[in-house]
């Protein structure tokens, strides 16, 4: 069952959206409904910032030369 939703938006945005809908042979209602479905489908997915914040910090000595460690590790991987 569909419900009525009243929106208040800027007049120029309304005109642009109406033009877009006409050119693509869709209703503005369908555009809004599909947008809501899309953002709700992504709502449960964690974003990258949240995932990074959950990572454990690496175990590195504070005085390590990270650039040197990078090149050492890279050469070990390449068998040099």
Image (spheres, grey):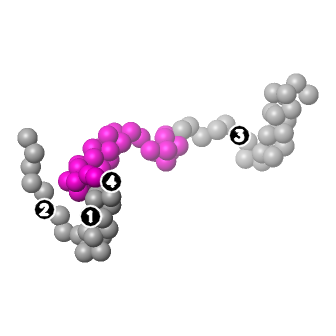
Furthest residue toward top? 79
Give the class, few, some or many, for how many residues have Cα within 10 Å of label 3's Cα (few <14, many ≥20). few
Give the class, few, some or many, for how many residues have Cα within 10 Å of label 4's Cα (few <14, many ≥20). few
Pick whichever of labels 4 and 1 is earlier in the sequence: 1
Pick whichever of labels 4 and 2 is earlier in the sequence: 2
Give the class, few, some or many, for how many residues have Cα within 10 Å of label 1's Cα (few <14, many ≥20). some
Q: Is residue 24 left or right of residue 56?
A: left
Q: Which mark is residue 24?
A: 4
Q: Which mark is residue 18?
A: 1
Q: Nearer the viewer, residue 42 or 72?
A: 42
The answer to whether the residues at label 4 and label 1 have Cβ atoms under 8 Å apart is no
- Give the labeled residue for mark 3: 60
- Residue 51 location (% of width, % of height): 49, 41
Label 3 or label 1, whichever lies nearer to me, is 1
Task: Tell me which corner region of the image, top left, top right, bottom left or bottom right, holds residue 21.
Answer: bottom left
Mark 4 residue element? loop
- Give the labeled residue for mark 2: 6
Gap between marks 3 and 2 measured at Cα: 56 Å
Gap between marks 2 and 1 measured at Cα: 15 Å
User: What's the residue at 32%, 40% (across, down)?
Assistant: 41
């Amino acid at each position: 069952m569909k419900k009525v939703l009243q929106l208040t938006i800027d007049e120029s945005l309304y005109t642009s959206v109406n033009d877009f809908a006409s050119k693509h042979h869709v209703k503005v209602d369908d555009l809004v409904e599909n947008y809501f479905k899309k953002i709700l489908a992504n709502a449960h997915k964690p974003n990258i910032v949240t995932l990074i914040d959950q990572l454990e910090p690496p175990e590195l000595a504070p005085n390590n030369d990270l650039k040197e460690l990078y090149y050492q590790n890279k050469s070990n991987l390449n068998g040099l």
